[in-house]
Amino acid sequence: MTGGTRKIGVFICHCGGNISDVVDVNAVREFAAQQDEVVASTDFRFMCSNQGQARLQETIKEKGLDGVVVACCTPKMYEDMFRGSAKEAGMNPYLLEIANVREQCAYAHRHEPEQATEKAKALVAAQVAKVRNLRPLDVKTAPIHDGVAVIGAGIAGIHAALLLGNAGHKVTLIEKSPTIGGNMARFDKTFPTLDCAMCTLSPKMNDVFNHPNVDLMTYAEVKDAVRAPGRFTLTVVQKPRYVTDACIGCNRCTEACPVSGPKSPIKVESEWNLGLSPRKAIYLPFSQALPQQWTLDADHCYYFQRNHTCGICAKVCPADAIDFTQRPEEVQVEVGAVVVATGYRPFDASQIPQYGFGKYADVYHGLQVERLLSSTGPTNGKLLKKDGTPPQSVGIIHCVGSRDEKYRSYCSRVCCMASLKYAHLIRERTGARVYNFYMDMRANGKGYEEFYQRVASEQVGFVRGKPTRVTDQATAPEEEGKLTIVVEDTLAGVVLRVPVDMVVLSTAMDPEDVDGLLASLKLDKSPDGFVKEYHLKINPTETAVKGIFVAGCAQSPKDITDTIAQAGAAAMSASMFLGSGSMTLNPLVAEVNPDLCRACTRCSEVCEFDAVRVDPEALVAIVDETSCEGCGKCTVVCPTGAITVRQFTKTQIAASIDALAPKAVAP
Amino acid sequence: MTAAAVRPFDEMMDELAKAGASSLYLCYQCGLCTSTCPWSEVRDVSVRKMLRQAQLGIGGLEGDDLWLCTTCRACAARCPRGVDIPTVIRAARSFVAAAGAEPDRLKTVRGHLASAQNPWGGKPEERSRWAEGLNVRPFEKGMDVLLFVGCTAAYDPRIRTVARALVRILDAAGVTFGTLGNDEVCDGDPALRIGDGDLFRSLAERNAATFEERGVEHIVAISPHSFEALKHEYPKLGASFEVEHYTQLLARLLDQDRLKLRSDGNVPVTYHDPCYLGRYNGVYEEPRKVLESIPGVRLEEMEPNRADSLCCGGGGGRIFLETPPEERFSNLRIAQAERVGAQVLASACPYCVLNLEDSSKTTAKSPLAVRDVAEYVAERLA
């Protein structure tokens, strides 16, 4: 290519040694200076610093640059910032490209500095070639709808909704179960302070319930979401409660309901008490539930299941609040931002059969023990075995499913402290001997180590080792009628058999099953199954989808302290986004040349984002620029080259490739 | 006394890494291996501690305990960090055996394998004596399967009956098969497990060459140890054929209605999962299906079973070593079989049958017949 038409500047960053310790930046700078149309080539210790950006802007102005290549770290980190600087200096920001010479070069080839330098040169040459072929792009903006939806009304969703409501935003808080409160409402006490969980949660539940800016939808699920510039349209299914808001909360229906009675053929277990108690077909999940509106479970109701033979609830209701004719209703909710706060559920302990969950009556998972310890639980807060007697000894097994390649490889982060809490409460209330079977004790929050000390001082047994099994097969008289935990005490180096009356499994945290929701919101999951955040470290509350934020255990396992912190941060991010009033639309998406388009629909068939459709009248493909992710799949299948992704046209890509590999490298 | 300075044994660490044992460094010392290891039922031995010392290169794998491992994989099946403990053991055994420091009895086994191509010391020209009086033909192309007999079924008088039983079953089902006769050599499993990779290779290559020469495409193995070696180790040397365990073939023949079996009254039978069939290859259901197809058989499950099954104590070269009676896993297994009221304890591995029968004779409180699945089926042929 013969030069003279473009003025391109190349800026090589040392990254304080991250790059320059491996790559010979002087050689790259000199090499860049020799490229056609490059009029400025410079290197600097930190291009991301104020000075670095000032130099970029000065050079743009001095030399009248209309193209820039910054050779630095991944574009994920600073591309937006450098483009912003270029824009301030008067250059079209989309004429700037990053050559990633850190992650894709210096980091990858730490031990081959010479070859790394050659590769850095090639990467710079490729981006210079690309920049030569770039054209300036206009940025479109769209106004942002002022409403925000928070999905999930556990502690994360409640906290985020309250903050957003307090900041003056119109909030729709959507909860799929009949009550708000989430898992935290099931807890008895919270570590490390041993506060009563409901005493701290209940005021927040009431605040959000009564908040003038928060519109609460319970027993409602998001079925679908459609994205448009600055706006999400959520289709929310309001499930029928068969109880109208005339309900006065007198409980007569529940008392009269025959379901789960001793002779009833229809029985159903309480989800709230995790299967530890029966419930009626018409019920309030727990006494402080909000709203205080009863719900009828049609799947376990004689009226619905036995051909309208019952209906006693309607007969005893003094408020005439039972309405068997209700049907699911679809409601459209328009918002500008969404906070995903869908929470966690306990790992299914029966996947590890050797621990006997589901096989032995007195093996429980942690959340069940919360209910057993709670004064509103099935035993009114008395820790009792299934036979109604208090345990003399209890074994608590940590890391059940967590930190285990066979199940969940991540640490669930809360179980060490939760297990200490169970140990304390069980000792305090029953005097039972308690053993904690742990691998590493992780007490890394404020007040946590102190809590560990306190529980240790209460003569709780700690055995460092992962048990191999829980068995009822006795090999000694002391084991008769007990559950024996077999484990290597790795600190003493001996195998122990520990007979106990009750076993508590501190199970891993699994993300709540929200695959459908994530698919309709176009959100990704990280390999552990939790919602993928924009950047694990520096941006854990945003997602790859602009306007969608994530809070609490939906993103990763965390305790209440961290959940509150992240929910606050997510609310702040959402508030800032909404407050900005308008959003810039990413111009690096697909566009169609109508002259070349044959309306063959191949592009719309391969698009995973429903971003392309073919107009049947005009016989041309049309791109929805807000939905398009710029992935380029359509450009590959297009038979005529009519559809291209801006700044990734075939000419631009080919120019890069030619620069990367000027000679044929293989026959 | 002051503690000695840490001096990592670099050669051993390098050898372990080269032999594919690097997963050792993932171990976070939870001790699940120790408490899962069947040895923990009968004596003190800490797998965890061995791994701990090996991680730091300060020993741990050179002592006598190294030769206890039956390679049963119970530990690896559970390890939360994915440490391939049997491979670590195998690599360490190679290192120790290369220095000639393995137990004396295993030196003899290596000698037999090298000179007579079987670990028992039987004469190569007598390998096919087990088939005397039966019309067993040499394998030739066009036959349905090659029956890979294995050394124990060829030479051990107790296990020869298993091979003979299988011949009767295959004949009854109309399966055409042949053997390699005296040209079969040890599958190499014992050499591999006791740390002689070169010896394994020479044996495996010899068999593989014979398979190639005779046009063998489909092999049925009597021993799960042969099955595992043929299925997962031979392909690494470039060999290519289909292989299955005989219980898989029998299950298929029953599906095809090619075997007619007579009732055995109402008999409580329990099945012991061989490690190399179960944990190594996931074959749990076929042997049970074969047993249940014998009219009158009532299958009772011992605890533990399937993936959690207790090793008989015979793998990893242990079949050649002496184990004191109070340390025999097979004794525990007999008690477990008696607990479920079994009158027949069936298994499908020569080592298991040998060990269990020994323990049944010495420790069973009431008569408990130990039978290989093939023997049991042959006995009930209509």
Image: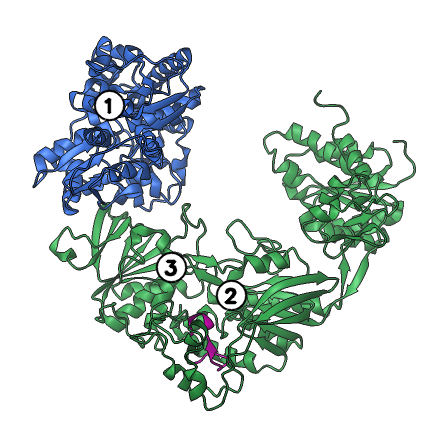
Query: Viewer-proximal residue, A6 or A330?
Result: A330
Query: Badge 2: how crowded within 10 Å, few (<14), some, or many (20+)?
Result: many
Q: Residue at x 24, y 45 (%)?
A: B304
Label 3 amino acid?
Answer: Cys
Residue on which the image places disc 3: A416
> Which scheme is used to colour this image of the protein?
by chain
Question: Among all residues in the image, which is located at the extreme right?
Answer: A4
Label 2 amino acid?
Answer: Thr
| Res B192 quadrant in image | top left
- Measured along the vertical axis of the image, is residue A547 above or below residue B188? below
Query: Badge 3: how crowded within 10 Å, few (<14), some, or many (20+)?
Result: many
- Measured along the vertical axis of the image, is residue B71 above or below residue A360? above
| Res B79 quadrant in image | top left
Label pair 1/3, CB-CB below 8 angstroms = no
Question: Among all residues in the image, which is located at the extreme top?
Answer: B125
Marks 3 and 2 share the same chain? yes
Query: Badge 1: how crowded within 10 Å, few (<14), some, or many (20+)?
Result: some
> In the rendered view, does A173 fall on the left or right side of B73?
right
Question: Among all residues in the image, which is located at the extreme bottom?
Answer: A318
Q: Would you say residue A291 sits in the magenta stretch?
A: yes
Our reading of the magenta stretch's main secondary structure is loop
Q: Which chain is green?
A: A
- Measured along the vertical axis of the image, is residue A346 above or below residue A654? below
- The chain carrying label 1 is B
Q: Which chain is blue?
A: B
Residue B7 visible somewhere in the drawing: no
Label 1 amino acid?
Answer: Arg
Residue on which the image places disc 1: B168
Residue on which the image places disc 2: A563
CA gap, disc 2 and disc 1: 69 Å
- Measured along the vertical axis of the image, is residue B126 above or below residue A312? above
Magenta stretch? A288-301
